[in-house]
Amino acid sequence: MPDAIKTFPLVDGDDPALRQELDRLAADNDRLAGSLVAEKQRSSELVKCVFALRQLHEAPDRPALVDALEEIVVNALGCEQMAVLTRDGIDSPFVVARAVGDAALRLQSLSLRAPSTDELMTMLGNAATDATGHDLLACVPLLCGPQVAGAVLVFALVEHKNRFAPADLELLELLSVHGGSALAVTAPRVALA
């Protein structure tokens, strides 16, 4: 807030009503300045979501989509250990398409040979603990309709970030809803003879 409003001195003979009005205007200015900061933050969060959606839906193929998922999770969410699981069809097994940080080591302790989506998601959703005692922080199913086309697993955030912010949870929800359909679109196709 401008100092002129905050520090306007009361001079002998000033109208008390004028002083009261200046104080009210200063309080309104403080409130509006706080609202402006909050709206700028929210705008930044929405831009991040739009950018993530664009990356997902503009990926021309499966490797580019996995690259986009990694970039979103590592850079936008601040994850230093994560993995992306994909599969080629409803009856296909899950495969590790990407592992960042120690995620590859952590995945060795998890059996990805689960015969069904429900069993895999139950196992991962139980915050599976690896041999070193570290928990899975998040398991985000990548949905295509009611089917799970893949998953994003988050094992660790960057050191200065100790939890997901509400905006991060919104982005994870966005990945869940749009990531699976993008995986389905980029799934390898069997050539017809």
Image (tube, rainbow, N blue to C red):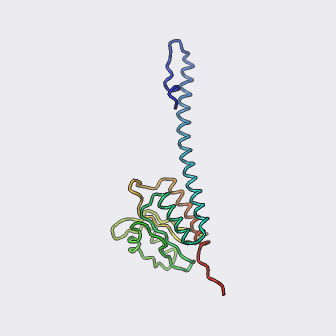
Question: Which residue is at the far top?
Answer: 13
- Residue 55 in percent (x, y) is at 58, 62
Q: Residue at x 47, y 61 (%)?
A: 74
What quarter of the picture does the C terminus occupy? bottom right
Q: Quadrant of residue 91?
A: bottom right
Q: Is residue 70 left or right of residue 102?
A: right
- Residue 68 in percent (x, y) is at 54, 64
Q: Residue at x 44, y 69 (%)?
A: 99
Q: Nearer the viewer, residue 147 or 84?
A: 84
Q: Is residue 26 left or right of residue 133?
A: right
Q: Nearer the viewer, residue 132 or 119?
A: 132
Question: Which residue is at the far left?
Answer: 132
Q: Nearer the viewer, residue 119 or 67?
A: 67
Q: Quadrant of residue 129?
A: bottom left
Vertical comparison of 50 with 142: above or below? above
Q: Residue at x 34, y 71 (%)?
A: 131
Task: Count the labels in the image.
Answer: 0
- Residue 155 in percent (x, y) is at 42, 64
Vertical comparison of 137 with 97: above or below? above
Q: Residue at x 49, y 69 (%)?
A: 84
